[in-house]
Image: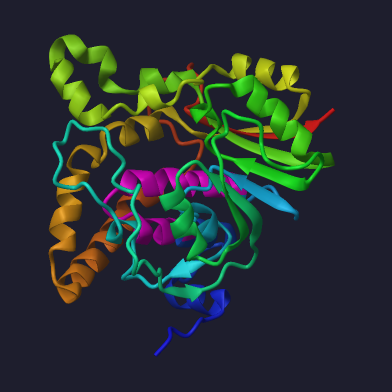
Amino acid sequence: MPTRLTPCAEVESLISPRGLKPAAQRKTDLLRRFIEAYWLRPENALWMTLRGEALSSVPLHRPSIDLSCGDGVFSFLHCGGRFDPAFDVFTSVAGLDRRQSERGDMFDHVRDDYRPPIVCRPTESIDVGTDCKSSMLAKADRLRFYDRLVEHDHNHPLPFGDETFETVYCNAAYWVTNIDEFLSEIRRITRPGGTIILQVKLESMRRYTLSAYEAALGRRFLEIIGRGRLECWPTLADRSTWESRFARGGLTIKGATPFVTATHAHLWDIGLRPIAPLLVRMANGLTPATRNAIKADWVELFCELLEPFCDPALDLLPAGDEPAEIQYVLQAY
């Protein structure tokens, strides 16, 4: 029997805590949705909650495009969608028996039976999603959330006409090597007066890791927890450099919202990343009933633990350095 799709408001009224103000309730509900989807990487769920909260301040007017959409789960959940709690992104992975030091992406795989059980459709959709990995686009396609999906490497000109989109969103610009051309291409495909939303990591991310303590911890320790992530972000830069790039690309800054602090970044630095493949192997080897029962308790625990950190301004460390990630709202001039 197909899953009955329930109106989002009804679902949220069933699971959201009573007595919370609307903004707090929305944030709590968003955190729960992300933890349910990314439960074995709760530090990623926290980061996505902060990212979603920042994005909620900007309307996604259509026609819209999500550049580097991946499997589509982030945007699907951000726009109000909800999966059955039994579903998570770890149900379709591969390469878990490889050595922990390998830098492969366990998510770069899609099973034939990958069909996320949707109990609540998003309240809005996005016209186009792009990504360089076909497996990720195959997953995104099964959400039936994007009207069109395009496989593309963003180090090359975007395959869209001039002034095509009213809203352009990207949370992975720092992955692009040819960043100046990419920003110029974004400007080209955006309609006059349209909105460009870029969420970018800053160079400060390198300082919010344990890499400064290599002498005490050893190179091997850093390799195990890092897994090559910093090398995948070739255009990390400080705030001034990002803003100079925007100016060169003909983009005007309409708003800038820091949403990940040094505290958030340090929590994320290790998280459960080193043991994630082992956790996934263990969880996926359980019977569905046992897995779901453990996951339910796990989700409740991490909702409580991480809720205090859902404040984008929370920083328990000495002030003075730049944020770890910032959202820019831009327009072409």
Q: Quadrant of the C terminus?
A: top right
Depicted 89 relative to depicted 165: above or below: below
Residue displayed at 69% across by 47% down: 58
Residue displayed at 35% across by 47% down: 108
Quarter assignment of residue 117 = bottom left
Q: Is residue 24 visible?
A: no
Q: Is 9 displayed left or right of 249 in the figure?
A: left
Q: How is the image coloured?
A: rainbow
Q: Which residues are magenta?
A: 30-55
Percent x, y of residue 232: 40, 27
- Our reading of the magenta stretch's main secondary structure is helix
Depicted 177 relative to depicted 32: above or below: above
Of 295 and 1, nearer the camera is 1
Percent x, y of residue 279: 17, 51
Quarter assignment of residue 315 = top left
Q: Is residue 35 visible?
A: yes
Q: Residue furthest top?
A: 215
Q: Is 40 within the magenta?
A: yes
Of 89 and 297, nearer the camera is 89
Q: Quadrant of the N terminus?
A: bottom left
